[in-house]
Image: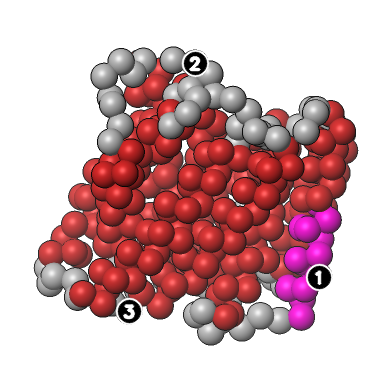
Amino acid sequence: MPRARPVSLRLALVLAVAAQLSVNAGSGFAVNAFALASPAAMVVFRTGLSALVLMAVLRPRLRGLTGEAWAAATAYGLSMVVMNSFFYEAIDLIPVGPAVTIEMLGPLALSVILARRWRAWLWAVLALAGVATLSGLSLSGINPLGTVYILIAGAAWASYIVCARWVGRAFGSGQGPMVGLTLGLAVAAVASLPRGLPDLIAPPVSLEALGWGAVIALLATLVPYGLEMIALRGMSAATFGVTTALAPASAALFGWVIAGQSLGWWAVAGMALVTIASAGAASDEARGRPT
């Protein structure tokens, strides 16, 4: 199977930012949907519906896939279900903005580990300062169990970034990466059944909950994961890990607009710091390769 053709860095950056905006809009809607269905049930519906939609649209041919491709898709799906499950359990207990802020520790740690230039470490530190500012410099009053859940989700997010790049390499060009995404979602849906299926069937979820689930599947899975799969073919995992520092700002914004969660002035300073860090890392990467 031929290797995937890389995209330009500029396009990759645009797609990565668009993915963050979409997934955090979905998170804002998910907070409201938890009144209708449990977080675990929403994970089953979100991953299952997304996998079915992609299966129907792509009609992927599974014959001829390499062992590496199957391994990549499986690892990708497992990292996805851990990330989504613990994230949804967390935002059922703590506001979306602080949750994503804490979750960012995973990708930020990844960006530091993979950095090859001292300036990359500088941008990571600046982004971390933005995360601290966005969280109001204090996590007092945050639900302890929710904090544990979101720390696990952050570690899974870092793993997800690495696995997504692996899928992009293993599945080749054309529709290959999307086939990898489809298989990963199928793995995630199956893995989420033991925890979420009982909440779906006893008692049965309402049609309103299913409607919200469809919206969340589109915004939080189908759109962002597809965009990220393409974006990760045009930038390093280190750069992607730093550019996702935009996530706390967008999460806080959508949490305020959609879920009615307050957004203080301290968030503005945090947004500015993570935006500068993201732009700086992207600028350094652009100088080091053709776009």
User: What's the CA distance linking mark 1 and mark 2?
Assistant: 45 Å
* Quadrant housing residue 7: top right
Label 2 amino acid? Pro
Residues in magenta, as a range: 265-277
Marker disc for residue 24? none
Where does the image place residue 70, in percent across and percent down from the top left? 35, 24
Visible residue check, residue 100: no
* Residue 35: image tag: 3
Q: Which residue bears the numbered disc 1?
A: 269
Q: Nearer the viewer, residue 95 or 190?
A: 190
- Which label belongs to residue 2? 2
Dominant secondary structure of the residues highlighted in magenta in the image: helix
Q: Is residue 93 above or below residue 154?
A: below
Q: Amino acid at mark 1?
A: Ala
Q: State whether residue 107 is above or below residue 147.
A: above
Rendered-image quadrant of the N terminus: top left
